[in-house]
Image (cartoon, rainbow, N blue to C red):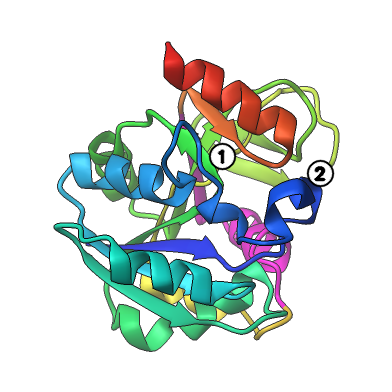
């Protein structure tokens, strides 16, 4: 299965680093977080990557020219100002008509990718996200069993589960995305939720995104352990 990684955002909340390099290339314990994400998928046998580039995409291209990995890596320009849904939509021709993984280029987790995939296949839905429970400062989802009943990005809800990325997606879901200006986290996921096509794989283990320098420092400490 193909692994799509969204790596084109501006990373404005961590501008100490993103002024010169894209956020996915910020090193966590001497290795870009993007590579650490790819290593995690590779550990489960998934080694075909499609990296959606945007802001300072050439930095990522140059890195993979210099470094050699035993992976199939496709670096694809998806536009400077394209939103998350739009970036995914632009990859449609590369994804053919196959099921695929999707994640963000700024979050690490020890989620079991094979268990996630098995869960997705069992439920036979269009899209599965990994639900995590970090300290409350993100958007939230409401669950009924494993089905996502309500999806609201950056809205305070009392259950505590949020969208942690690490998706499994059926190709038909791409039809929910209108174009370049579509945020994956808004209309497409909200529509899938309303139609009963969005499920959540609950992950109680490690998960940490890297939005700020404070997050980066926290990840450094965790990885040192």
Can residue 201 be seen here? The reply is no
Question: Does 170 appear in magenta?
Answer: no
What residue does disc 1 label? 164
Depth check, front residue: 104 or 188: 104
Q: Residues within 10 Å of mark 2 (few under 14, many from 20)?
A: some
What is the magenta range? 182-202
Residue plotted at (45% across, 61% down): 5
Residue 25 position in % (x across, y down): 52, 54
Q: Which mark is residue 10?
A: none
Residue plotted at (51% across, 76% down): 58
Q: Quadrant of the C terminus?
A: top left
Q: As displayed, is residue 195 above or below residue 117?
A: below
Q: As displayed, is residue 217 above or below residue 178?
A: above
Q: Quadrant of the N terminus?
A: bottom left
Residue plotted at (51% across, 42% down): 27
**Residue furthest top as drawn:** 225
Q: Residues within 10 Å of mark 1 (few under 14, many from 20)?
A: many
Mark 2 or mark 1: name the one nearer the start of the chain.
Answer: 2
Q: As displayed, is residue 114 above or below residue 85?
A: above
Q: As displayed, is residue 130 above or below residue 179?
A: above
Label 1 residue SS: loop
Depth check, front residue: 83 or 17: 17
- Tell me where residue 91 sits by quadrant: bottom left
Question: Does 195 appear in magenta?
Answer: yes
Query: Is 26 on the left-hand or right-hand side of 63?
Result: right
Residue 94 position in % (x across, y down): 33, 83
Numbered-mark total: 2
Residue plotted at (61% across, 61% down): 22
Residue 206 position in % (x across, y down): 47, 22
What residue does disc 2 label? 154
Query: Is 191 on the left-hand or right-hand side of 224?
Result: right
């Amino acid at each position: 299965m193909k692994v799509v990684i969204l790596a084109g955002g501006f990373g404005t909340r961590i501008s100490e680093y993103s002024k010169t390099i894209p956020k996915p290339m910020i090193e966590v314990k001497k290795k870009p977080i993007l590579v650490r994400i790819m290593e995690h998928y590779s550990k489960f046998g998934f080694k075909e990557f499609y990296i959606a580039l945007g802001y300072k995409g050439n930095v990522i291209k140059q890195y993979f020219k210099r470094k050699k990995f035993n992976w199939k890596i496709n670096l694809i320009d998806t536009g400077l100002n394209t939103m998350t849904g739009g970036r995914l939509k632009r990859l449609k021709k590369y994804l053919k008509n196959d099921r695929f993984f999707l994640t963000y280029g700024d979050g690490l987790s020890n989620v079991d990718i094979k268990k996630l995939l098995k869960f997705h296949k069992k439920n036979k839905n269009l899209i599965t996200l990994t639900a995590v429970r970090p300290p409350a400062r993100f958007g939230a989802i409401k669950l009924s069993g494993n089905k996502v009943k309500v999806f609201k990005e950056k809205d305070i809800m009392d259950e505590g589960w949020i969208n942690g990325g690490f998706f499994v997606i059926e190709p038909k879901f791409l039809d929910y995305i209108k174009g370049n200006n579509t945020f994956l986290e808004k209309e497409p996921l909200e529509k899938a939720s309303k139609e009963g096509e969005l499920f959540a794989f609950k992950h109680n283990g490690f998960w940490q995104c890297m939005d700020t320098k404070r997050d980066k420092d926290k990840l450094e400490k965790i990885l040192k352990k």
